Amino acid sequence: MNTSANPAEAHNEALTGFREDVIRGLSASRKRLDPKYFYDATGSELFEHITRLPEYYITRTETRLMEQIAPEIGQACFDTRAVVEFGSGSGRRSEILLGALSTVTNYVPMDVSAELLEATRSVVNLAYPEIRVVPLLADFGQELSLPSEVPSSRLGYFPGSTIGNFNPQGATEFLARARSLLGDKARMLVGADLVKPHHVLDQAYNDSEGVTERFNKNILARINRELDGDFDLDAFAHQAFFDEGMGRIEMHLVSLADQKARINGGPVFEFKAGETIHTESSHKFTLGGFRDMARQAGWHPVQHWTDDQQLFSIHLLSQR
Ligand SMILES: C[S@@+](CC[C@H](N)C(=O)[O-])C[C@H]1O[C@@H](n2cnc3c(N)ncnc32)[C@H](O)[C@@H]1O
């Protein structure tokens, strides 16, 4: 994403990219927006709220599981010197991981949200002053490079089942890119949400407080704020459902009427009543399906863990 070292230029580049993606996505015959655009400061706060909702089992379950298995991860990754976290968010589970890895000297949180990266840096600096934090404002969907000072013997960390936001081919390609980014002797730890009864999934993405709805609509609010758009948020409804055939939760914004909207200096986007904008997919995995995907990407599945209720899985992969 940002190739410029100058913050003002980087901001302009990011804004131009956002504008181009919005125009492309909303001009397509099946309208879509990239879920990475949920995460401005407001969206990140809403996501944090989601993680504390009773219906949203993912964060709670993964955190507890990480706490339980941290010593085993510490043993299996005994020689790790750098942790590279993709989509680090609040960095909450990073603390658990870093606490289990006594040989780590560098931590590289990577996110599209500058605010979250700064917050993560402070939290980790405070908890582990001996670890150098190297924040990377970058899009993990793109080709990446790491600062040369990040030592080898690296552990990639991708929690939160954020890998489920890719389609299966995109997830395999991501894992393959991560493998070459992390280099020889690397390992990778990935959190993957498991297939489960539909009602549990449907509730998790349709919470009773309407926080997920606000999170979903924030993508339009962000277009209004940053691209001077005129989307009427009340004229769209939140929709999230499990698509059995695709094995994924799909999140959409449904147009409640025939309507038009535009961004400053951009084209007019026309919506028919009932037409949707596809804002996010969250693929769910089987244990075998995830391991096969990792193998296709060139990783060797070493070990995996699940919680007692088999809601969530954490997979350790290695280069050999
Ligand atoms: C579902 S949240 C998970 C956050 C955290 N890892 C957790 O498990 O709670 C996704 C995180 O990835 C970041 N993110 C989403 N798409 C991204 C992308 N393409 N590149 C880098 N970061 C991204 C978001 O800003 C957000 O912090």
Image (cartoon, rainbow, N blue to C red):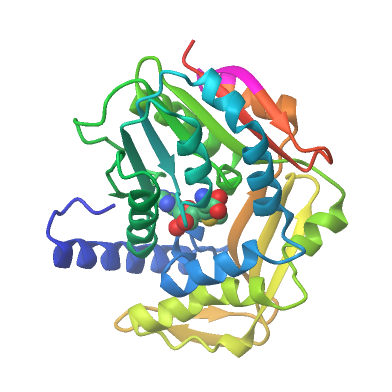
Residue at image point 38% right, 78% down: 267
Look at the picture and state if 281 lies above or below 178: below
Residue 64 magenta: no
Q: Using the image, determine if residue 81 lies above or below residue 91.
A: above
Task: Tell me if residue 10 comes above or below residue 283 in the rendering.
Answer: below
The residue furthest left is 6
Q: Is residue 299 magenta?
A: yes
State the residue at coordinates (42%, 24%). Answer: 179
Count of numbered labels shown in the rendering:
0
x, y percent for residue 59? 64, 53
Q: Is residue 34 left or right of residue 20?
A: right
- Which span of residues is magenta-colored? 295-303
Closer-to-camera residue (224/65): 65
The image shows residue 244 at horizontal and vertical percentages of 81, 47
Residue 143 visible to the viewer: no
The residue under the point 71% across, 48% down is: 61
Residue 217 place in picture, x, y as percent = 57, 76
Residue 117 position in % (x across, y down): 35, 56
> Which picture quadrant has residue 204?
bottom right
Relative horizontal placement of residue 272, taking residue 264 as reference (left or right):
right
In the image, 46: left or right of 3?
Answer: right
Q: Report if residue 172 is visible in the image.
A: yes
Vertical placement of residue 87 versus 144, above or below = below
